[in-house]
Image (tube, grey):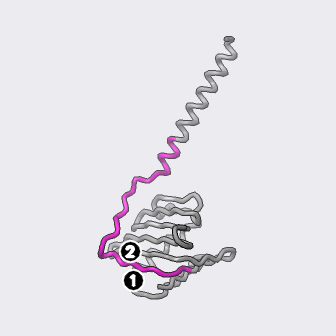
Amino acid sequence: MSSTTAQKAVATALVSILTITFVCVISCATTSSHQFSEPTFDWQTKSGQLMYRTSHTTLIGETLVRFSKTGEFELMVSKGPGITLLSLRQDATFAEVKGAFARQGWSGPVAQAPPQLHGWLGLRDQFIRAPDRKIVRYAAGNETFVFRF
């Protein structure tokens, strides 16, 4: 083997190792170790419908909302049985968003959330502030949320 071929082989191996290392580091950075509280009997649970609207999108789906007196919050939006469009878990400082409507999903400190999630992450306060309302309306930017329970 010539020295040029050997150098190419070493360079290729080095690039492969760096790529694998980079993917591992990025994966670790986006994987959360945050522990949310599990719902208990004293959490309030509501089920009904959500109409979500922006200038380009309208979504009507079934919704399940759960929240505690201490500020933990869960929201699930589905379309038909077994089709979860959005799943959101949030406490005072941290959130996790998953599902087809959330694209690749996101988790992290609420203060560092991407702009497109700000409306969704504002819902927690709406439910905690008015836990007994049958209709919850909330507008954030160009997004409108209307829940009917």
* x, y percent for residue 85: 55, 68
Q: Which residue is mark 2?
A: 67
Q: Earlier in the sequence, mark 1 or mark 2?
A: 2
Disc tally is 2
Residue furthest front in the image: 81
Question: Which quadrant holds residue 99?
Answer: bottom right
User: Between 14 and 114, which is closer to the camera in this rendering?
Assistant: 14
Residue in the image at 49% along x and 76% along y: 63
Alpha carbon separation for disc pair 1 and 2 = 9 Å
| Horizontal relation, residue 133 to residue 8: left or right | left
* Image side of residue 125 versus residue 17, left or right: left
Q: Is residue 49 magenta?
A: yes
Is residue 133 depicted above or below 79 in this figure?
Answer: below
Q: Where are the magenta residues, as a range?
A: 24-50
Farthest-out residue, bottom: 134
Where is residue 122? Give x, y as percent: 49, 74
Question: Circle 1 sits in a helix, a strand or a loop, which is it?
Answer: loop
Q: Position of residue 16 (x, y in %)?
A: 59, 31
Q: Secondary structure at mark 2?
A: strand
Residue of label 1? 131
Residue 92 or residue 10, whichever sits in front? 10
Residue at the spot x=50%, y=85% of the render? 148
Q: Quadrant of the N terminus?
A: top right
- Residue type, label 1: Pro
Percent of width and height locating residue 39: 34, 69
Image position of 136 (left or right of 73) = right
The kind of residue tagged 2 is Phe
Graded by Cα atoms within 10 Å as few (under 14), some (14 to 19) or many (20 or more), the crowding at tag 2 reads: many
Residue contact at pointers 1 and 2, CB within 8 angstroms:
yes
For label 1, the crowd category at 10 Å Cα-Cα, with few meaning under 14, some 14 to 19 and many 20 or more, is some
- State the residue at coordinates (45%, 79%): 47
**Residue 106 magenta-highlighted:** no
